[in-house]
């Protein structure tokens, strides 16, 4: 019986080892697949949007327009030792055109546009989120000047709490990787990182410090004038005539740009 017990033990140990190997191997393959999926989540390319595609948001547009020159002629600013803003945070209600404006910035400056979402970096596998951040910046650096857009930055940049519960450690690592990468590239590289959130109050202070997202621009719901501009922009696109724009602007209080765009599209559909 002792011999039998030993054989039994050896067999079960081997069994457990094979089992562990398979789990590990499968996970590794899965993780590699996840990393190669990176290409799918990033939209890389030149943006054809311009600030003409953005209606309303006059002050935000002006502030971003200034950045076009920073991106195109960084030497001009570094000659006077002026620090070019590295990070711009756009915050405000969803559908107010934050993504649109980041695209327009890249389009006007004529540089590649890299877009990711904070939620893409929230991963089950340790270190993957941080790795993705490093990968993203590596790619952006290769193309020289660029606009990197991180939507839903609150997903990785939540306030850190002392004695944080397990699971948020991974988020910390991703956030640290982002902060390191942002301080890593040169001031005159002609690269800016634009982040968007509708919950600025939940962001970690480390993100908002100088040298990080130190320029914060609020993107508000359009007022009556801005709504009129947005309505005109989209009515033009569908060749609509004889529409009372003032009346429509009065009827769309609290509408975001996205809601107005959708309203006009639905109206076009039912008219057709
Ligand atoms: P956010 O990133 O703030 O959630 P988006 O930029 O994704 O908003 O907006 C979604 C869509 O709504 C845009 O692609 C555009 O069609 C429309 N839109 C929103 N705001 C504006 C605006 N100010 N001017 C023109 N179109 C707008």
Image (cartoon, rainbow, N blue to C red):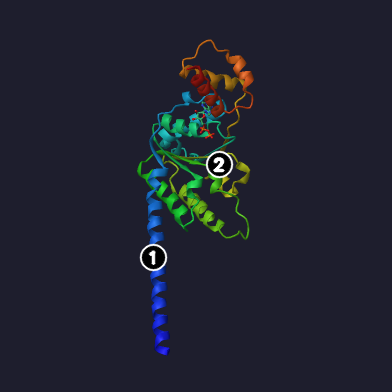
- 1, 177: nearer the viewer: 1
State which mark lies toward you, 1 or 2: 1
Give the distance between the C-alpha atoms of the residues marked 1 and 2, in whole angstroms: 47 Å
Residue at the (42%, 73%) spot, across then down: 16
Q: Is residue 225 above or below residue 181?
A: above
Is 166 situated above or below 208? below
| Identity of the residue drawn at 43% across and 50% down | 132
Rate crowding at label 2 as few (under 14), some (14 to 19) or many (20 or more) other CA atoms within 10 Å: some
Say which element carries label 2. loop
* Furthest residue toward top: 242
Give the mark, 1 or 2, whose residue is nearer the N terminus: 1
Whole-percent x, y for residue 180 in the image: 48, 52
Whole-percent x, y for residue 235 in the image: 50, 18
Based on the displayed image, in which of its 4 quarters is residue 76 positioned?
top left
Q: Nearer the viewer, residue 105 or 221?
A: 221
Pointer 1 residue: 22
Circle 2 residue: 214
Q: Position of residue 266 (x, y in %)?
A: 52, 23
For this orientation, the residue located farthest to the front is 1
User: Percent x, y for residue 169?
Assistant: 54, 58
Image position of 39 (left or right of 237) = left
Displayed quadrant of residue 246: top right
Question: Which structural element holds mark 1?
Answer: helix
Residue 54 visible within the image: yes
Residue plotted at (63% across, 20% down): 251
For the question of whether residue 210 can be seen, the reply is no
């Amino acid at each position: 019986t002792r011999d039998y017990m030993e054989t039994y033990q050896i067999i079960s140990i081997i069994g457990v080892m094979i089992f562990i190997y398979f789990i590990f191997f499968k996970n590794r393959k899965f993780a590699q697949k996840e990393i190669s999926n990176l290409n799918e989540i990033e939209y890389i390319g030149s943006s054809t949007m311009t600030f003409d595609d953005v209606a309303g948001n006059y002050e935000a547009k002006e502030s971003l327009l200034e950045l076009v020159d920073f991106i195109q002629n960084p030497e001009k600013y570094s000659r006077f030792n002026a620090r070019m803003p590295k990070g711009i945070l756009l915050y405000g209600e969803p559908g107010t055109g934050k993504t649109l404006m980041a695209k327009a910035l890249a389009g006007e400056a004529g540089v590649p546009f890299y877009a990711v979402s904070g939620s893409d970096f929230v991963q089950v596998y340790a270190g993957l989120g941080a790795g993705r951040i490093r990968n993203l910046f590596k790619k952006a650096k290769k193309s020289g000047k660029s606009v990197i857009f991180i939507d839903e930055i609150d997903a990785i940049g939540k306030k850190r709490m002392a004695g944080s519960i397990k699971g948020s450690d991974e988020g910390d690592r991703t956030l640290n990787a982002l902060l390191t990468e942002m301080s890593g590239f040169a001031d005159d590289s002609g690269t800016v990182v634009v982040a968007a959130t509708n919950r600025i109050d939940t962001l970690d202070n480390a993100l908002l410090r100088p040298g990080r997202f130190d320029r914060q621009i609020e993107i508000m719901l359009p007022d009556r004038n801005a709504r009129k501009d947005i309505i005109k922009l989209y009515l033009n696109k569908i060749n609509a005539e004889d529409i009372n724009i003032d009346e429509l602007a009065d009827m769309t209080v609290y509408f975001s740009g996205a809601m107005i765009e959708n309203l006009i599209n639905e109206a076009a559909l039912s008219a057709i």
